[in-house]
């Protein structure tokens, strides 16, 4: 049986090698592997798939962190936080908190007029005190302050610690009038008062806006779980998602270093009387986030991160909560 060499055309009896040019005819005529086999065996494809998977994984982590704070607060309160998702307050039985001082609207319950007392000799001062004591609180108020560390350390020796976690500590003062005055003296207020009607189910909420970057998230909620006999059973939930601290070189870089974020939460409950004061000390894991993160978050109590004293640990981030 004769064959022609596929390279030079030399005619010869069938053999594996061409007698003229020496080509391996069988290897020359061997069919190539299917395209899909060659693609799957290509090492560049494997590297590309790994890179795509890593990008998707990092993107997913960042996306989930951006909603972590809102989800945690919603689970605690059972109601949406954003205005586009919020239910009718009349249906929920709750009073939502507006995001700025100009938008704060509270419907204070009417305070009964003091009952006239028959004046008797030497009884004017006790009568005035009795009238003041008879007034029922009608609102719950929360205000964020920047307070000197030394001021707090001295006051907490007479307080009851009612909560502690990796996000901060919570202290309760049974008689908080003078304590509140001592804290406010020489301190800097970093937010307008947050107010809500004092009733079972009343809520105060604040969180960073959607413009805040994923590595800079803050949310806090206060809820009156029960209000009776001039005493409120108060629940609190605070959550922070912050990037890890960066080196000076990383801070100076135009491109933020890709680092894992750190989540911290602070939650609990306690009974707060009409004369009591709840002091929540927020202690973030990173006091020096990137300036661009802070600028994108906009105005809010988180602006305390711009304070050099706070960044250096000289002052503390404090929330004062009392009944008005």
Image (cartoon, rainbow, N blue to C red):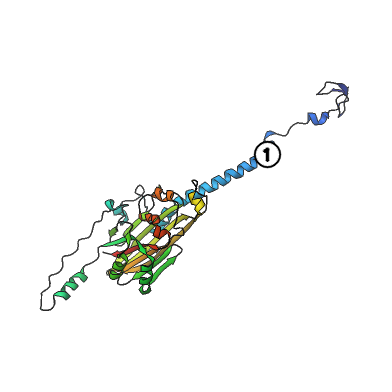
Q: Answer with left or right where residue 159 lies relative to residue 63.
A: left
Of the pair 213 and 88, the residue shown nearer to us:
213
Q: Position of residue 91 (x, y in %)?
A: 31, 54
Q: Which percent across, then down, holds residue 258?
A: 52, 50
Is residue 153 something one can see in this rendering?
yes
**Quadrant of the snapshot with the C terminus:** bottom left
Q: Is 275 drawn above or below residue 78 in the view shown?
A: below
Q: Is residue 183 above or below residue 240?
A: below
The residue located at (67%, 39%) in the rendering is 40
**Left-right relation of 165 to 148:** right
| Residue, disc 1 | 42
Mark 1: few/some/many CA within 10 Å (<14, 14-19, 20+): few
Quick check: can you spot residue 201?
no
Q: Nearest the camera: 18 or 84?
A: 18
Query: In x, y percent, where is residue 31?
Result: 75, 31
| In the depicted structure, whether residue 129 falls above or below residue 254 | below
Quadrant housing residue 69: bottom left
**Which is nearer the eye, 111 or 185?**
185
Residue 184's spot in the image, x, y percent? 30, 64
Q: Quadrant of the N terminus?
A: top right
Q: Quadrant of residue 116?
A: bottom left
Question: In the image as oriented, which residue stretches furthest toward the bottom?
Answer: 122
Q: Secondary structure beneath disc 1?
A: loop
- Residue name at image x 70 percent, y 34 percent: 34
Side (left or right) of 11 relative to 210:
right
How many marks do you count on the picture? Answer: 1
């Amino acid at each position: 049986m004769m064959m022609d060499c596929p390279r030079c055309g030399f005619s010869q009896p069938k053999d594996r090698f061409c007698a003229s040019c020496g080509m391996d005819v069988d290897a020359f005529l061997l069919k190539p592997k299917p395209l899909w086999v060659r693609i799957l065996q290509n090492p560049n494809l494997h590297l590309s798939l790994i890179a795509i998977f890593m990008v998707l994984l990092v993107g997913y982590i960042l996306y989930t962190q951006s909603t972590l704070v809102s989800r945690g607060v919603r689970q605690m309160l059972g109601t949406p936080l954003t205005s586009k998702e919020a239910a009718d307050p009349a249906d929920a039985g709750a009073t939502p908190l507006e995001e700025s001082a100009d938008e704060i609207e509270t419907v204070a319950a009417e305070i009964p007029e003091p009952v006239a007392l028959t004046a008797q000799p030497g009884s004017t001062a006790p009568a005035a005190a009795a009238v003041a004591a008879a007034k029922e609180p009608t609102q719950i108020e929360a205000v964020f302050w920047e307070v000197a560390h030394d001021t707090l350390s001295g006051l907490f020796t007479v307080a009851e610690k009612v909560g502690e976690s990796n996000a901060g500590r919570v202290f309760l003062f049974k008689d908080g009038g003078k304590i509140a005055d001592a804290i406010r003296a020489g301190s800097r207020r970093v937010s307008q008062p947050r107010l809500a009607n004092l009733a079972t189910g009343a809520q105060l909420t604040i969180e960073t806006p959607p413009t805040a970057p994923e590595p800079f998230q803050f949310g806090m909620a206060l809820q009156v779980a029960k209000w009776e006999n001039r005493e409120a059973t108060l629940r609190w939930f605070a959550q922070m998602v912050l990037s890890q601290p960066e080196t000076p070189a990383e801070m100076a870089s135009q491109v933020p270093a890709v680092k894992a974020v750190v989540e911290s939460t602070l939650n609990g409950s306690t009974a707060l009387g009409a004369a009591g004061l709840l002091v929540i000390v927020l202690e973030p894991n990173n006091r020096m986030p990137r300036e661009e993160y802070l600028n994108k978050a906009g105005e809010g109590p988180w602006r305390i991160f711009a304070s050099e004293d706070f960044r250096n640990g000289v002052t503390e981030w404090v929330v004062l909560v009392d009944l008005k």
